[in-house]
Amino acid sequence: MLKVGGNISGIRGIVRPGALLLLVSLFFMVRPVQSQNFTEVDKNTYELYMSGDWAALVQAGKSALKQDIDYYFLRMRIGVGYYEQKNYKSAQSHFKKALAFNAGDLVALEYLYYSYLFGGQAQQAALMYDKFSESMKEKLPDPGLKPVDGISVEYLNSSSNTDGLIADPATFEDLPTGYQIISSSYNNLNIGLSHFMHPGTSFKHAYTYLGKSNYYYSDDGINRIAIGDQKVRQHQYYLSPSFTTGGGLVISPSFHFVHVGFQIPYLTGGGIAYVDGTDNQMVGGLALAKFQGPFKIRLGAIYSNFNNADQVTGSAGLTWYPLGNLDVYLGASVNAHWEDLNKSGLSMIQDFIFGYGIASKVWIEISAAGGNMKNYTESNGYIVYNGLDWMRYKVLGTIMVPLTKKGSAIYAGLRYADYSSGMIPLDSSLSGEIINELNYNSTSFFGGLSWKF
């Protein structure tokens, strides 16, 4: 443990009790009273520090700050008190304040560096490490960021309970001409790569393959077609660089290219034949994030052009780390989603997340989202919902088991989602209206490996 001592010996002249009462009664003579409190605070916090009573030390230090008693050793002791309780987020502000009192102090710098590292702010730690002297770099572990920093693989399988809906002859009666898609099942494979270019700069890449089977119904006014296994094949590439400033602001633009290949059925004399259709779609976004004490503030904006329409989504979110570390977190965000073909205007989508670790051996995360997620994206454009049916709400549960101290882990989870499907009319005057809305749900199982080098 790093030691923060420093009894202040420059304070002189203990005030006698009788004189003290007189001074208290005279408001213009209040400074000697604060000097006495300063001495008591310094003695008390030093003793609490030496005894290792971290919780009491933090409370005593915060009480002193409320009395406008503030100096280097007090800030260091409060910071260490938080640090020893693994409350790295709260510790950071006190070590920064200590450095404001004593710029370049090696002890404060070392504590702040570890607070960033253990608080999940590796890029800020890397920016600090880059400015350390060679002797200090030899003393401290490097942030662990490498040109190829990590790789991840995830597989998801999803199936919908649509058999009864499709079998009902009333499902597609008395409809205008057009077509309708109902997702039956799909498999999703994602491979991600992250790499570190320079202190404060990193890149995230991902390739995703989606293989999907749909129930397809169409009526062009002459022929009706209904098939239970329309094939969709989707290839995606995602890129997002992140730039972290010295003040902790993380700026992350993103780009996502989506190539969709799908079957278009038509009737021939011998039955149903298919031609291949394709559609290229793009997503561009910008996300901003910054820690403010135990809170992470998130803002973002996304543009996409899914399914012959334009979409814009703005988001604002907040994540709270009540223990000041990554063991427990609770977050929420509000997303305003607009599409030019949506006649109902803005769709408001809310999402929530809660995660906690059990003895640093198992992490459990629960998340949920609700709203009209038609042609929608999440996670700064990383996850896309560009199917012709759309999600209305979802609930996910994930269990993660760490494998290495660097952060490698395996995980598995379950997702339950509620979907809607609507007829896409051939009559352009009906575009944007929901016709023949059908509701059903799907269950998905997923698992993956995230490996840190």
Image (spheres, rainbow, N blue to C red):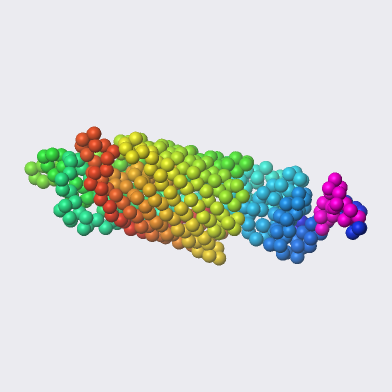
Residue 6 forms part of the magenta stretch:
no
- Left or right, 217 with respect to 137, comes to left
- x, y (%) of residue 416? 36, 57
Task: Please state, as top left, top right, bottom left or bottom right, where the N terminus lies in the image.
Answer: bottom right
In which quadrant of the rendered view does residue 283 lie?
top left
- Left or right, 357 with respect to 338, comes to right
Taking the view exactly as shown, the residue that stands out farthest to the front is 25
Decide: is 123 above or below 279: below
Whether residue 199 is visible: no
Q: Residue at x 54, y 58 (%)?
A: 328
Along the viewing direction, whichever of 27 and 347 lies nearer the viewer: 27
Whether residue 177 is visible: yes
Taking the view exactly as shown, the residue that stands out farthest to the top is 429
Mark count: 0
Q: Residue at x 50, y 61 (%)?
A: 363
Boundaries of the magenta span:
19-40
- x, y (%) of residue 57? 72, 60
The overriding secondary structure of the stretch rendered in magenta is helix
